Image: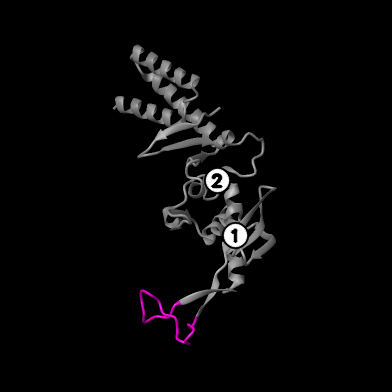
Amino acid sequence: MVIPLKIKTMKKELITISSDELAKVDNNSLNSQQLKFMLRKTPKEHIYTRPAKGGGTWNYVTGTYVKKVLNIMFGWDWDFEIIEYKYDLEYRQVFVLGKLTCRTNGKTIIKTQFGRQDIKFKTEYRRDSNGNWIMQEKHPDRKQKFPTNIPLDLGNDLKAAATDCLKKCASEIGIASDVYAPNEFKEINVIDGEAERKRLAELKKKIGDLLDENQDKDEKQAIIDMIIAKEDAGEDTIEFYENLIADQLQKNL
């Protein structure tokens, strides 16, 4: 069994884990390459910021980025369907219920979510009781615009709500989860379980050969004790053996 190893980096902890340990099922819907792609941090150039209602800002990714990730992860074999949509001119919002279907490795992943968008309304200029155009207070040379109850382009609002819905469905799989749930996100480096076991076996043989060449009995026993302690703690990782081998090779120079 490979236990997750926390590797200290600049200001964060990167967790390395095998694909075998990531899911407690015999046949995961996602392979190690898909998991590695999904569980990494979103590239900074794809993260944007916008003002949030009530103050502050929100980070977000675009619908184009989410579609790109879905195409890469599922080889273009995914569908997005709007199940239902509504708009309310009183609440000035449109709502959609959508379903994302992804097919991979002989299995189907389905996620449903809601999306929303504020409706944009047309504006108009108005005259006062004397028939003069109402001007802006701060800019007396400019006409004052007034909102109406006529939607500017309801179709565009529905498309924006559909994109919002797609992004929410994709987030249910884990796409851009570092953007939408940063406090819960931990970047994970996924490695293939079988490949890791093979690599560990190679490294253990290598360190065993180096220890056979070591003439210092006390040092050899200390290293053996350290390996046993790491194994007992579940920390006999690839990085541990690679560092141990590097130290031994350095001493043999």
* Residue 167 seen in the figure: yes
Residue that appears at 42% across and 28% down:
240
Q: Which residues are magenta?
A: 126-144
Give the quarter of the image for residue 22.
Answer: top right
Q: Which residue is mark 2?
A: 33
* Residue 79 seen in the figure: no
- As drawn, the residue found furthest toward the front would be 129
Q: Closer to the observer: label 1 or label 2?
A: 1
Front-lying residue, 184 or 5: 184
| Residue at mark 1 to residue at mark 2: CA–CA distance | 32 Å
Front-lying residue, 41 or 19: 41
Front-lying residue, 114 or 223: 114
The quarter of the picture where the N terminus appears is: top right
- As drawn, the residue found furthest toward the bottom would be 131
The quarter of the picture where the C terminus appears is: top left
- As drawn, the residue found furthest toward the top would be 218
Q: Position of residue 9 (x, y in %)?
A: 37, 38
Q: Which residue is mark 1?
A: 116
For the stretch drawn in magenta, the main secondary structure is: loop
Q: Please rate how many residues cluster around mark 2, counting C-alpha atoms within 10 Å: few if below 14, some from 14 to 19, many from 20.
A: few
Left or right of residue 85, residue 202 in this image: left
Decide: is 24 above or below 156.
Answer: above
Q: Position of residue 220 (x, y in %)?
A: 37, 16
Front-lying residue, 34 or 102: 102
Counting residues from the N terminus, which is met first, the one under dot 1 or under dot 2? 2
Inspect the image, locate mark 2, and give the three-letter code of the amino acid beneath it: Gln
Left or right of residue 140, residue 167 in this image: right
Inspect the image, locate mark 1, and give the three-letter code of the amino acid beneath it: Arg
Decide: is 35 above or below 78.
Answer: above
Q: Position of residue 127 (x, y in %)?
A: 48, 83
Q: Is residue 191 magenta?
A: no
Decide: is 107 above or below 17.
Answer: below
